[in-house]
Structure formats: C-alpha cells, structure tokens
Amino acid sequence: MKSLFYSEYRAKNSTRVYLFTLFICCISMIGCSSAPTFIKSDFKQKRIKSIAIMPVIDKRNIVEETDKTHESLTNIEELLTKKITSKNYDVLSPGTVKNILKEKVIDTVTPENLCTILKVDGILYSELFNYNDVFFINHSIKMQFKFYDAKGDSLWINNLDDSDKPFLSAICSTVGWAIGLSLDNKITSKDKLPRIIAGVVASELVYIIVDGISNETSQSIDGVFTTLPNGKYCDKENIK
C-alpha cells in the first residue's frame, strides 16, 4: 500500500516539475511588447508629417566588414522605410539621405540642421548592436531608435531586443504533450515512443514551414514601432 502511494506521489511530483520547467522554458522564449523608453507628451501636437531616416549606425563588434554585414544593414534600412511609410509619414529613405548629404559626417550635424538640409519635420536615428538571422536556428536583433523634431527636441525613444530560436521553440512546444503521453496508462509502452517521436518530428516540420514563410526581422521592427504615433493621414482634420 505504501509502495503504491509512493509511486503515485512520485508520478504527480515529477509531472509538476516537468510542467513547471516547460512553463519557464516557454515564457523565456516569448517576446514581450514593451512601452517606449520615452515619448513626449505633446508628440501628436507637433503634427509631424515628414521623417528622414538616417543610415543605421552599426555598433556590432565586427572585426571585418563583409558583403553580409552590408546586406544586413540594407535589409534593416529597407524595413524601417517601409514601416515608417506605413504609419503615414512622408519618408526620406537612408539611401536618399546619403545622396543628399554626400560627404557630410552625419554625427557632427545637429538634428535641427539635418531637418533644414533635408527639409523634413523629424529625424530618426537607429543603432544596431546585434543581428542574427539564421534559418530555423537563431533570429535575434538588438537596436535603439531615437526620434527628434526640427527644434532638436527628443520626441520618442525605444529599444528593440528580440530573439527566437525556432528549433528550441518547437522542442519546447512538444515537451508537455510528450510528458502527458508518457504518463497515459491507456497507451501501451511500446506505442508511446513512436508516438512521441512522430509528434516531435511533426512539430519541427511545422516550425520549419512557418519560419520559411515569415520574416522575423520585419515582425520585430513592426513590434517596436507600434508605440510611434501615426502620421498626418491618420489625423481626422487632414482627411478630406
């Protein structure tokens, strides 16, 4: 009797431990959408209509620049241009900014002067600290964004620190199911292992398909810019 009681207690205790581990594992992999680091209370009253996106400042610890590093910067700059445009601002892309400024060192020019030269209402600065985009293995991006108006006032600051490891996420998603299956007395021992293996394989295939058709970098950038107020066409007074 004691042996039976002990067995049941051990099974329940093991299940709790496994489920708690699963919970911690999954929570650590879920990205959270946070409020901006700073947003000026009268941002909307500024009535910003046009934004110049400065070329992304690469602050990664890279020993030697390669085509891949340039490609990652270009990719991020294109996504930023699309995102800001979708928020109904008139946008000067980083490429256009480079052509206008030519040999000017952007770091030495104040936001006020940049707005005057580029004929815009605001300037968006971006710094890249980390970026990895390896299919099904690792997606991570860490950036900081700062937005200034033509007077040089800081209007909006936000940080992006997002990461996902699809392979581990797929494993994590099947752990709870596998534990439940292994403890199901209605299924014979010889059938449990094949079912668990089949479930893990199916889960990995689903994640591979999803990862192949999704753009993790775009989704991360979309998330961080949800806190940036929309532009002129979303102002009811400007809709005709």
Image: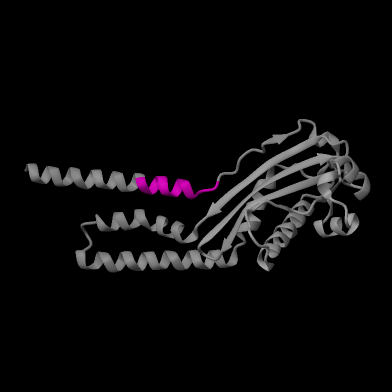
The answer to which of 41 and 199 lies nearer the viewer is: 41
Image coordinates of residue 161 in percent, x first then y, are 60, 47
- Identify the residue at image location x=88%, y=56%: 103
Does residue 88 show up magenta in the picture? no
Rendered residue at 66%/66% (across/down)? 68
Residue 158: image quadrant is top right
Q: Residue at left 71%, top 45%?
A: 145
Q: Position of residue 90 (x, y in %)?
A: 85, 51
Quadrant of image for the N terminus: top left
Number of disc labels? 0
The one of 117 and 234 positioned closer to us in this rendering: 117
Image side of residue 157 versus residue 189, left or right: right
- Residue 131, relative to residue 153: is it above or below? below
Magenta-drawn segment: 21-31
Magenta: main secondary structure equals helix
Where is 28 relative to 74, above or below?
Answer: above
Please state which of residues 184 and 20 is positioned toward the viewer in this rendering.
20
